Amino acid sequence: MNKVYLMTPGPTPVPDKIRRAESQEIIHHRTKEHSEIFKRVSDNLKPIFKTKNPVLTFASSGTGAMEGSVINTLSSGDKVLIPIVGKFSERWVEICEAYGVEVVSVEVEWGNVVEPEVIKEHLDNDPDIKAVFTTLCETSAGVVCPIKEYGEIIKNRPNTILVVDAISGLGACDIQNDEWGVDICVSGSQKGLMMPPGLAFASVSDKARGFIEHSNLPKYYFDWKKALKSWEKADTPYTPAVSLIVALDEALKMLNEEGIDNVLARHSVLADAMRAAMKSMGLELLSSNYPSNTVTAVKVPDGVDGIELKNVLDKKYGIKIAGGQSHLKGKIFRVAHLGYMGEFDVITAISAIELTLKGLGYSVELGSGVRAAEEVFLK
């Protein structure tokens, strides 16, 4: 019997404190008790998002907040720009096209990012573009996009907003929403926030609220005018996920006690250690120039079956990692260092990867990856 180590980029491990908070007796949501909790949660989300703007909370996956950001800011026939760097940036395209929004896409090979000057060129040449929809951390490729540079290009364009999917990146990769000019930042509960799935979030700038006033796309549950009006009263338009909000109260307490910059620094060290370990084993990262602190994407070495590698880690060693998606299925494996994780989670995963590769016939010196990671931790 193996102990299970959840090393996927979502869901991530949930601390005991948060599980216990979620298991408390249910309370009614139209009460002063719930309003006080919701107000505290709404306030405590702001330091995590690095914003003074409202952060809305929804009972949905992060995709619900992505869809909400489209239908609340745009109108039928509007044009948007979407840099495609992996599977989840493709989701922006699918949502926009479902609502009759015209998409201008810029696609690069997975493992790379769309450079800021390309974004600027498109916006300069096409002033009708109303929004840029992008991703902070593209977990399918293990890359982090240059959001700060995108924001510098967009913040002084009154007719264009910047919308960022930080579902996997929030709490692991730095995003300074106000400072960088991000108008809408969406996220989810099951990754850096150390929660079970079920909550989605969206920070909304004043500039974005202007767009919300003029949007004519159909909406009901994800009507942000209603959500913002209720948010002002520490409430939600419809029944919230009460137990998850109580658990979120505990999660935010833990994160803010550690301090968001310390949380980000912890993720940076864990990512450095994982990358150093993979390189020491002679493995190649999918992204060398733009690696994410959320998840490390590694190319499966020649002679090794990527599907079998993932299965051995799971069945023999209890290490749950993610495989490649789309055209990279079987060609890469992805190991997260996200949320409720520390040095020994990373070391355990590295040692299991060494053993698995050795067992599958790959030439690796046992202990080389662990040693490389430990050297990072010692620094």
Image (cartoon, grey):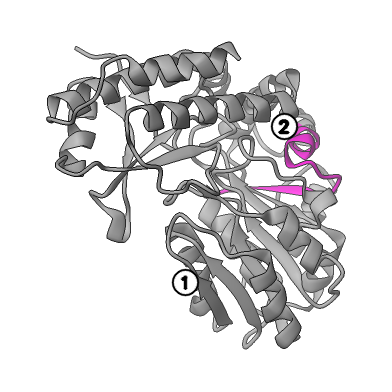
Find out whether the residues at labels 1 and 2 contact each other: C-beta distance under 8 Å: no
Q: Residue at x 26, y 16 (%)?
A: 366
At which x and y percent is residue 237?
70, 53
The residue carrying pointer 2 sits among few (fewer than 14), some (14 to 19) or many (20 or more) residues within 10 Å by Cα, namely some
Q: Nearer the viewer, residue 57 or 28?
A: 57
Q: Could you tell me how many numbered marks the image carries? A: 2
Task: Indicate the amino acid at tag 1.
Answer: Glu
Q: Is residue 83 visible?
A: yes
Q: For the C terminus, give its image quadrant.
A: top right
Callout 1: SS = helix
Magenta span includes 193: no
Residue 35 picture quarter = top right
What residue sits right under mark 2 in the picture? Answer: 34
Say above or below: 161 vs 12. below
On screen, residue 287 versus residue 115, left or right, reads left
Give the Cα separation between the discs numbered 1 and 2: 36 Å
Callout 2: SS = helix
The residue carrying pointer 1 sits among few (fewer than 14), some (14 to 19) or many (20 or more) residues within 10 Å by Cα, namely some
At which x and y percent is residue 15?
52, 18
At which x and y percent is residue 161?
75, 69
What is the magenta range?
41-60
Q: Residue at x 28, y 20 (%)?
A: 352
Earlier along the polypeptide chain: callout 1 or callout 2?
2
At which x and y percent is residue 325?
32, 54
Q: Residue at x 61, y 51 (%)?
A: 136
Q: Nearer the viewer, residue 208 or 198?
A: 208
Say above or below: 261 vs 159. above
Magenta span includes 42: yes
Task: Indicate the amino acid at tag 2.
Answer: His
Q: Residue at x 54, y 19 (%)?
A: 376
What residue sits right under mark 1 in the picture? Answer: 94
